[in-house]
C-alpha cells in the first residue's frame, strides 16, 4: 500500500513540474478521441473526416481553452449532419441549442462532461463517467451526464439511419425529422442507460458525502453495482438484449477509476480518526477529523566510487595524504593528481583506497 | 535589492488581473440587483427561444398524430398546456438564474475587495520605501 502512496507522490511531483505540458497533452488526447469517435460514427462528409483534418483540429484545440474543443466537436457533428440531410442538421442543431440554453449557458464548465460521456459510451464503459464525476462535482453535473447520453444515441441513430435520409423534398424532410426525433427519444435503451447513470451518480454522490469510514470506496462500489442492477432490470423489463459482459467490464472500469481518484484526491488515514464534541450558544457539535495521508517519496542517493572529483563524495586529497603517511607509495610511480586521467596503476590504488574508505564509512567501521 | 514580499504580492496581483480578475472587474461594475436583473432578462429571452425549439421539435415529431386527431378541443388543450409549461419554465429559470448570478456577483465582489486590499498593501510598501 505504501508503494502506491509513493507512486502517487511521484506522480504529483511529476505533474507539478510539468503541469502545463501534461494538461495540454490530456486536452489534445481528449480532443483527438472525441473527433476520431465522431468521424468513426457519423463521418459522412469525406473532407471533414480525413485523419489530417481531425489531427489539425485537435492540435488547434489544444492551444485554446477546453470550451473550444466542445464547440469544435459540436460543429464537426453538425457538418456531418449537413452531409446526411437538412433534417438531420436541423434536429441535431435544435437539440444542441436546447441543451445550451437550458443547461450549459448557466454552467459552462459542465460542457466537458457532454464530450466525455459519449466517448465513455463508445468505449462501452459508461459507468465510469457518473462515478468519476459524482466523486468530485456537485449535483448539477447530473444533467450533463444525461445530455451526453442523448448525444451518443443521436449519433448512433444517424449512423444506422443515414442511408435512408436522402429525400430533399418537404414531405421527405418532415418524415425524416419526425422519424429522427421519435426514434431517438423513444429509444428505451437510451432511457435505461441514462436512468442507470443518473441513479449511479445519485448513489455515489450521496454515499461519498457521508461521514462513514471508507465512504469513497463504498460509494464507488455501490455506484457500480447499482448501475449494473438498473441496466439489468431495464433490460429484463424492456427486453433490450444488452451485453452483460461489457456491462460488468464497464462497472469494473468504474470501480478502478474511482479507486484511483480516491488515491489521488481523498487519501486519508482512518486509523487515526479523532472525534470531538463541543458546543456553543447555538449549536452542539460532533466533529470527526480524519488526518490526510502523506508519504514523502524516498530520495535516491547515488554514491559513485571513482577517482573523479566532480562525482566524488569522499575527500580524495585526504585519502591520498593518509596513503602517503602510511608509506605505501610504490617506487617509480608518479604522484596522483586530481583530475589527471591515465595514471594506470596509481589510479587503481587510489580507487581501492577510496572504496575501502567508503565501505568503512557505510558500515560504520573504525 | 529585491523585496521578496513585494514580488510575491505583485505576482499574485498580476495573476489575478490576467486571470479571473478580468471577469470580476466587469461584474463588479454593476450593483448586484442590476447584474442579476440583467441576467434574468437574458434568461427570459433564452428560455423563450429554448421553449420554442422544444415546442417545434415536439410538433414535428407528432405531426402525423396532430394532423389525424386535429380538433378544437385538442388544439385548446395543447395551447393551455404549452402556455402553462412556458410560464413554469420561465419562472423556474428566473429563480435559478437569480440564485446563480447573485452568488457569482457576491464571490466576484469579495475577490475584488481582496485585490484592492492587496493593492493598498503594495502602495504602502512603496510609500515606506520612498521615505
Image (tube, coloured by chain):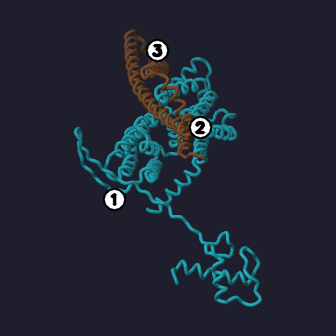
Chain colours: A cyan, B brown
| Chain at tag 3 | B
- Tell which tag, 2 or 3, sits nearer the viewer: 2
Residue B54 shows in the view? no
SS at mark 3 in the image: helix
Task: Count all numbered tags in the image, as a single digit.
Answer: 3
| Chain at tag 2 | A
For the C terminus of chain B, the quadrant is: top right
Write down the residue under mark 2.
A38
- Tell which tag, 3 or 1, sits nearer the viewer: 1
SS at mark 1 in the image: helix
Q: Between A290 and A316, which is closer to the camera in this rendering?
A: A316
Residue B116 shows in the view? yes
CA distance for labels 3 and 1: 69 Å
Write down the residue under mark 3.
B67
SS at mark 2 in the image: helix
Q: Residues within 10 Å of mark 2 (few under 14, many from 20)?
A: many
* Marks 2 and 3 belong to one chain: no
Please tell me whether residue B43 is drawn above or below residue A195 in the rendered image.
Answer: above
Amino acid at each position: 500500500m505504501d508503494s502506491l502512496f509513493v507512486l502517487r507522490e511521484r506522480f504529483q511531483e511529476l505533474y507539478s513540474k510539468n503541469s502545463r505540458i501534461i494538461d495540454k497533452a490530456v486536452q489534445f488526447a481528449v480532443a483527438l478521441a472525441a473527433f476520431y469517435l465522431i468521424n468513426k460514427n457519423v463521418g459522412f462528409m469525406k473532407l471533414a473526416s480525413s485523419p489530417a483534418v481531425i489531427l489539425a483540429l485537435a492540435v488547434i484545440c489544444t492551444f485554446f481553452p477546453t470550451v473550444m474543443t466542445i464547440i469544435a466537436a459540436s460543429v464537426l457533428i453538425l457538418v456531418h449532419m449537413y452531409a446526411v440531410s437538412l433534417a438531420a442538421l436541423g434536429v441535431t442543431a435544435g437539440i444542441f441549442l436546447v441543451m445550451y440554453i437550458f443547461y450549459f449557458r448557466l454552467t459552462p464548465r459542465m460542457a466537458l462532461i457532454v464530450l466525455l460521456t459519449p466517448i465513455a459510451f463508445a468505449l462501452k464503459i459508461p459507468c465510469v463517467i457518473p462515478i468519476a464525476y459524482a466523486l468530485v462535482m456537485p449535483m448539477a453535473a447530473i444533467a450533463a451526464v444525461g445530455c451526453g447520453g442523448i448525444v451518443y444515441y443521436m449519433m448512433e441513430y444517424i449512423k444506422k439511419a443515414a442511408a435512408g435520409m436522402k429525400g430533399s423534398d418537404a414531405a421527405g424532410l418532415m418524415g425524416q425529422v419526425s422519424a429522427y426525433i421519435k426514434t431517438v427519444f423513444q429509444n428505451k435503451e437510451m432511457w435505461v442507460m441514462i436512468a442507470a447513470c443518473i441513479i449511479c451518480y445519485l448513489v455515489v454522490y450521496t454515499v461519498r458525502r457521508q461521514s462513514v469510514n471508507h465512504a469513497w470506496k463504498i460509494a464507488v462500489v455501490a455506484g457500480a453495482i447499482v448501475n449494473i442492477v438498473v441496466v439489468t432490470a431495464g433490460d429484463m423489463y424492456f427486453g433490450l438484449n444488452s451485453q452483460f459482459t461489457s456491462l460488468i467490464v464497464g462497472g469494473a472500469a468504474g470501480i478502478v477509476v474511482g479507486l484511483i481518484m480516491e488515491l489521488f484526491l481523498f487519501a486519508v488515514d482512518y486509523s487515526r480518526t479523532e472525534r470531538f464534541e463541543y458546543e456553543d450558544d447555538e449549536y452542539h457539535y460532533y466533529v470527526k477529523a480524519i488526518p490526510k495521508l502523506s508519504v514523502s517519496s524516498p530520495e535516491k542517493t547515488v554514491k559513485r566510487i571513482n577517482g573523479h572529483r566532480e562525482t566524488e563524495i569522499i575527500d580524495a586529497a585526504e585519502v591520498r595524504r593518509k596513503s602517503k603517511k602510511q608509506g605505501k607509495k610504490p617506487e617509480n610511480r608518479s604522484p596522483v593528481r586530481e583530475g589527471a586521467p591515465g595514471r594506470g596503476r596509481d589510479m587503481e590504488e587510489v580507487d581501492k583506497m577510496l572504496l575501502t574508505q567508503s565501505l568503512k564509512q557505510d558500515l560504520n567501521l573504525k | 535589492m529585491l523585496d521578496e514580499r513585494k514580488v510575491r504580492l505583485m505576482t499574485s496581483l498580476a495573476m489575478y488581473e490576467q486571470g479571473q480578475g478580468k471577469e470580476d472587474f466587469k461584474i463588479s461594475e454593476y450593483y448586484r440587483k442590476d447584474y442579476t436583473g440583467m441576467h434574468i432578462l437574458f434568461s427570459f429571452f433564452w428560455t423563450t427561444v429554448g421553449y420554442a425549439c422544444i415546442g417545434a421539435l415536439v410538433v414535428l415529431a407528432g405531426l402525423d398524430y396532430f394532423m389525424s386527431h386535429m380538433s378544437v378541443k385538442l388544439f385548446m388543450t395543447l395551447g393551455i398546456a404549452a402556455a402553462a409549461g412556458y410560464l413554469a419554465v420561465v419562472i423556474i429559470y428566473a429563480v435559478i438564474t437569480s440564485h446563480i448570478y447573485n452568488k457569482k456577483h457576491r464571490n466576484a465582489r469579495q475577490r475584488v475587495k481582496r485585490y484592492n486590499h492587496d493593492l493598498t498593501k503594495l502602495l504602502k510598501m512603496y510609500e515606506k520605501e520612498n521615505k
